[in-house]
Amino acid sequence: MESRLARLEAVQAMLLEIGQLSASCTDITEFIGAVHRALGRIMYAENFYVALADREDGTVRFVYFVDTRDQGPDPQERVKLASPEQSPTAWVLLNKQALSMTSAEERARENGSTWGTGSVAEHWMGCPLLDQQHEAVGVIVVQSYLPEHTYSVEDQALFSLIANHISNALQGLQSMDRLERAVQERTRALAREVAERRRAEQVQHALYQIADLSASALETDELASSLHRIIAELMVAKNFLIALTHPDSGEISIPYFVDEKDGEAPHKRFPFGIGMVSYVLQTRQAQLHDAGSFARLQASGKVREPLGNVGIASWIGAPMLVHDKAYGVMVVQSYDPTIVYSKAELDLLAFIASHVAVAIARMQADRAIRKAKESLEAQNAALNRALTQLQEAQSELVRQEKLASLGRLVAGVAHEINTPLGICVTATSHLVQELKLTREELADGTMTEDSLHAFLDVVDQSLRIMTTNTQRAAALVRSFKQVAVDQSSDDIRSFNLGAYVNEVLLSLQPKLKGRPVKVEVDCPKDLVLDSFPGAVSQILTNMLMNSLVHGFEREQAGHIRIHAALEDEMVVFEYGDDGAGMDADTLAKLFDPFFTTKRGSGGSGLGAHILYNLVTGALGGTLRVESEPGKGLQYHLRFPRKLHKPRLMAA
């Protein structure tokens, strides 16, 4: 009787210890290890493990496994759950019932087939861990390989009682564990997103620099040196060269060459068909090679007479093309085996090469125009070709302006998202500090009802702050994602005009922030278009930016009104502001390309030109504009509600 009383006291002490551990431990493995040590004081538990189930993917994790004979799986490894006929652990978990069996009972049950994967125990005892809905969240198992250590009926009853208490404690710990894992995953995702955004900003900055170079009329060697510096900011480019084509003579020249092993280019000028540069021009595709693939190209005869040092570790080359016309090749190579380029660097070099080709095309066009002006009569044919090239370059500039508009939108939305995310970080830090203080009070035994209520108030307030700000950030990301996808896509889709206008305005909120300009939208809620949402987004963006840049001074209050209606399957879209307006002469030049009244102050002269082309081209509509000095500017658009995709003719 005394021994039973002593054991009951030990059991009671263990249950109290489990309750205390659940309140103090934050790590599941640490908690179960403490339970294992406490369990060993009331029964034989040298071999003990706990498996937790994941209902979503049908796997289990052996978060704690101590065994004198078998090696358990990694605690983080997810093991596919077996059937009840294959494993006693699975039997307990799926049947939600306790199981106790001796080695003789297990061999009798196996009937020639293996039941479980571990060593056969003299006595095996497992209990399910059930949540409040009586669903199995895991299994707790204790086993003995020694005949002198078996489990009585009383042991089994005590083990079931202990399993019930462990279940209650584990539910709270699992919730914390899932929350911590979710926070860690989100942190990793944010880190990746920040890295991607930083990379995008670097690329965008490089494109701005290249665009500036194209307008600077630099000499070829100065242009090439600037390009080398820009590319070196994006990747390792100790060895770099630019090759230019000369269609008239059928030759290739090397105006810029920097190499660690060769002091100067092997040939400043050589016939087309020699070396890797010629191979890139022949294929008209960016190329990524190492020493092995380079040797195979030589052996196959695809590369004739390689030029320069062939002891490369990695080599990338990209053609400079504009409308399938080749202007040359950009090459970056490495002799260091630790510096190996990937497809990401190859794509980046190809992207930059296409923009450099536009810059070179413009510079060549400018030179051709200057020569044509010197002898207009004799060089009329050359002047026509130069003008064609200039028009191509201008078209590319219009495309760059659209990309720049999207880039400014990215910067604005990223800046706007910083505020709610910063508030969330502050609220989280405050909550962590309050939690630490509360735990200290709890550990010291100084916690009062008032201090507990105060802590709960802090938790409630912090959660409301974080919820509000994360929803705000999510709304900004959602609107920007839709608008950005539409601006980069030329697909027709069905969309609600009123809702889409509000999405665009939300993505432009960083531009309106701090400006005393109110925007009013009057649009039927059921007006649905089958059209180009990207065109609508670009049109509205250009209208609003023109109003902010040209119509209102920085601190000037104003109103912008947007009205839409449907008349006989034609959308009537009206936009007006009460800003400065413009006189008749300026109004007549509004849609001319490169015309701006804010030259040097943020105006490119392409916004209204792009707006007009999108309305009359992509949307198939008409555009009328009215303005007077001091009376603002009003746009009147009419375009079809529904556009039809062009049918492809069968071959």
Image (cartoon, helix red, strand yellow):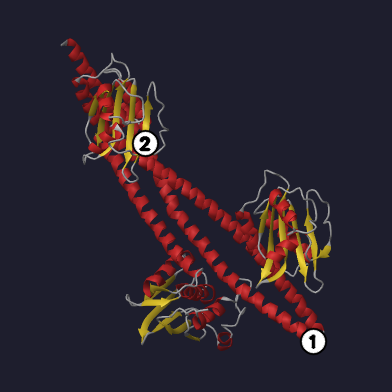
**Quick one: label 1, few (<14), some, or many (20+) residues within 10 Å?**
some
- Label 2 vs 1, first from the N-terminus: 2
Give the residue type at disc 2.
Arg
Q: Is residue 111 visible?
A: yes
- Which residue shows up at 32% across the image and 76% down it? 526
Judging by the rendered image, the residue that carries numbered circle 1 is 376
- In terms of secondary structure, where does tag 1 sit? loop
Tags 2 and 1 in contact by the CB under 8 Å rule?
Answer: no
Q: Which residue occupies the foreground of this view, 108 or 223?
A: 108
Asked whether, in this view, residue 577 is left or right of residue 88, the answer is right
Q: Position of residue 573 (x, y in %)?
A: 42, 81
Q: Which mark is residue 61?
A: 2
- Give the mark toward the camera: 2 or 1: 2
Give the residue type at disc 1.
Leu
Q: Is residue 26 visible?
A: no
Q: Residue furthest left?
A: 1
Q: Which residue occupies the foreground of this view, 137 or 617?
A: 137
